[in-house]
Amino acid sequence: MIQPSLKPSLREKLNISRFSIAYPRITIGFWIAVIVAGIMAFSSLKYALFPEVTFPVVVVSTTAPISTATETELKVTLPIETEVKSIPGVYDLRSSTYAGRSIISLAFLVGTSLESSTNQVETVLKNIQFPTKTDYNIIPLNLNESTAITYAIQSETQTLKELTTITKAEILPQLQALPGVLKVNLLGDGLSREAKKDIASLSSSQTLIQDPPTLVRYNGENVLAFQVIKRSDGNTLEVVNQVENTINTIQKNLTDVKIILAETQADYIKKATHSTINELFLAVILAIAVVYPFLRNFRATLITALAIPTSLLGTCIVMAIAGFNLETITLLALALVIGIVVDDAIVDVENISRLIDAGETPREAAIKGTNEIGLTVTASTLTIVAVFLPVGFMGDALGQFFKPFALTISSAVLISLLVARTLSPVLAVYWLKPVKNRPENYTPKPHPIIETYRRVLQWSLTHRKRVILIAIFSFIAGLALIPFVPQGFLPRLDRGEFVINYSYPLPQISNLQRRDEPGRVSSTSNEPQGVVSPSSDMFQQPGAFDWLTDLARNPIQLFLRKTRTTATKIEAVILNTPDVEKALTIIGIKGQPNRGRIYVKLKNNRQLTTLEAQDKIRANLPPIDNVTVSVEDIQFVETGDEKPLQIVLVGEDINLLTNTAKTLQEKVAKLPGFVDVRATGEDNTSNNINQIERFNGQRAAYITANLSQGQLLGDATNQVIEIAQPLIPNEITLKLTGDSARIGQVLKSFLITLLFSVVCMLGLLFLLFGRWVEPAVVGLTLPLSLVGAMLALLITQSAFGIISLIGLIFLLGLLDKNVLLLMDYINQLRQKGMGRNEAIIETGVVRLRPIMMTTASTVLGMLPIALGLGAGAELRQPMAVAIIGGLITSTLLSLIVVPVLNTFLEDEGLKIKNRFKKLGLWK
């Protein structure tokens, strides 16, 4: 038995409510100041879609007078890779090698200085002995410097050349001067410029030009356009608002020119953030609505309700100081903590109300009630912080992405604790009324639910092994459900917009010179093999010598025209789709005249989802010779048109790599749900190697694919691995890259973080309670939420990925609170001399109501998010689904399992102690 102590307990030392009740004016004044400051902080917060994550990338583009890809690899690519791989911070090194050209991409760890990395690359390149006449270009890429908004320019009276002059004089200078704008790119003047480019660089490689010539089409018409690129630290919505206001002013002065909004990130950001805010307000309303039916006291409900805006506004102050934005991820954090904020207030106010109903005055009830519950509320809040803080410091891109989320939740629950321990008791003292005219021996009639729970609890204490077996079975069932739950990474968003990328291979042409005389073309004697014949149907030009002459004089313009012709065929399908609002085509993207990008915007009132529209357009696209077309989602961060599924085969035999990749590509392309399946090196033959890919120091071949509706990345990756294993010879190793690899990396990071969080939580509980039983019970009951979470994900077909994993971590804190509510009160009653089983039964009767209230408020608060309504719902829904399912099962099971585990562990611990005493190992 736990013996009573005459010393002040830890709960009495931590009871700051006594001070708040003694000095109510100071307490009320402090929280009024917090509310005012919170309103100001909230108004200063900026809107964004996701946290800014820095992805430093440096590209080295090299040209050399070499006629084969293998020799270029030996003399250019390998020396560069050998030197740059030792630069600190490099975690991903890739290269593409062609005849006379090499492109190497270095990705650095998140947080690495792009300027410093660029300087280090430049330094090591100076020490390399390249072949004579080798040129290289170092291109630093900050992927946060993205296009914020794009406009098309049309005129019925002005020519394209005149529009270019007007745009350069009247529009671009004003936009370039706006805060947050890095630069403004003029697009569509490719045929009016002298695109001077060494023909030797026009191989099938990806050329990189700082200011490349381009062509632009808007809804099937040739136009001029400009892109506004925001600075890496610029806020997209702020930049877009400034640009829109400036364009409105400019448009008034240019009456014969139409400046048309063609593409913007702002619309979806606004929709997603406003949708999350609406769900946040609805969560607040539902969480409050569940309190009154339990307490049946309007004043007590109002005290509980006031805790929510007070805590959220206090959190806004922390967010403003930390420089966070109102992003989908931070707004989701605020929506999630609604349940915890209400829980803290519910537990305090419910305990005070219960004591008032028992005959205590409001002041006595407030002091006694907060003293009873103080350690429990403090311990549960600190354990939630212990769970989430490690999530924000996981490192790499994942940690940077979730840092605002974790710190927002941690600060919100700490402020909520302070509200519950100070403001709520003070309001209870002055707003709640004592019970009058009640008989001395009045005993309230127990609720039928409470009586049923009492009987179940009594049965459980006499059948402990059965209860423990039920708990073990539920955990095993949760594990068994995991393989049946859809596996994903990040959900695909129904943004109402997507892009179509297309390209065709450039001919292998090196050192092609001008025509010396009619009917004759001069070239150097070392012209490489593989030159495309003038009679090739790639360009379908009327005459061989005319084609070569045009190509020699201005090759890029020829390729741009060819790419534009291809665009018209694709645009015809897009614009004939009823749900399409507009299409913007940019030809010659990233300095590659053989590549085009078509941005497709769907109507707001549409019948098809984004994925359905993608599948429909993909199915209707006509086959175009030598042209590859890929329908892509718009990426969270522009990382270079990466497809979600990426498999890499590494080895040394390039022919074996190419053949294996082609075989695997054919197999994967036949699987349902896999589209736009591509393999690198498709143009390679055993006698002519045109392209060599390298991945982290080894030769490689990539298989990439998009996924159609209903196919999730985790499941797709597993299918490809299963098919690939019997096809891959011993000389080749299969590896994952891109999002396919990030799934495993995320799971590993979260597992390590989860274990660390649990250790921190249990260690904290041991320090607070001074016993091992409470931490042990908490640790053993944590898995009880798994079966409900997995079952909910399975029923709703929500993906088990990064978002639902966060929901599982969140469940640890919620379950911990319920367990501590039971354990702590059991200890208090036993310290007062009550028997163990009697204390457990009494605790169950007293604590059932607050536990059911907190569970119901959290579930209802999550319901708007779980319904999956509004823009960005795909991102929020899996987390809410996992929390609702896990919380329901864990609450029901913990009400029975916790008391049983408490007695079982205590009895077993006593047995072990007695055995050690008999052996003389315990005093």
Image (cartoon, helix red, strand yellow):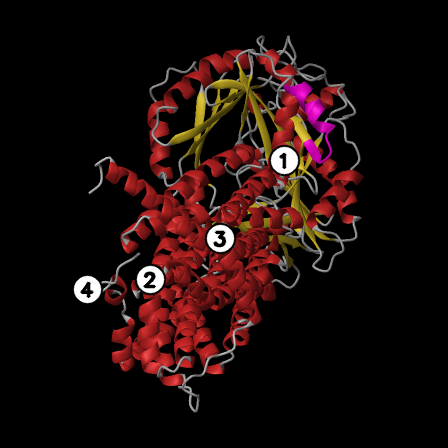
Q: Which residue in the structure is indicated by mark 1?
A: 715
The amino acid beneath tag 3 is Thr
Q: Amino acid at mark 4?
A: Lys
Q: Secondary structure at mark 2?
A: helix
Q: CA distance from mark 4 to mark 1?
A: 59 Å
Q: Earlier in the sequence, mark 4 or mark 2?
A: 4
- Tell me, yes or no, if residue 310 can be seen here: yes
**Alpha carbon distance from label 3 to label 4:** 35 Å
Q: In the rendered image, which residue does mark 2 sit on? A: 830
Residue at coordinates 29% horizontally, 78% vertically from top-left? 21
Image coordinates for residue 513, horizontal then vertical, percent? 60, 18
Question: In the rendered structure, which disc, 3 or 1, sits on the residue that comes first in sequence?
Answer: 3
Quadrant in which the N terminus appears:
bottom left
CB-based contact (under 8 Å), mark 3 and mark 4: no
**Which residue does the numbered mark 3 point to in the structure image?**
462
Q: Is there a contact, CB below 8 Å, between mark 4 and mark 2?
A: no
* CB atoms of marks 1 and 2 within 8 Å: no
Discs 4/2, front: 2
User: At numbered mark 3, what does the secondary structure look like: helix, strand or loop?
Assistant: helix
Residue placed under numbered mark 4 in the picture: 7
402, above or below 122, in the image: below
Q: Are marks 2 and 3 in contact (CB under 8 Å)?
A: no
Q: Residues within 10 Å of mark 1 (few under 14, many from 20)?
A: some
Name the amino acid type tagged 1: Asp
Label 4 vs label 2: CA separation? 16 Å
| Residue 421, image x, y percentages | 33, 70
Residue 74 in percent (x, y) is at: 47, 12
In the rendered structure, which segment of residues is drawn in magenta? 661-676
Measure the alpha-carbon separation of dots 3 and 1.
Answer: 45 Å
Q: Residues within 10 Å of mark 3 (few under 14, many from 20)?
A: few
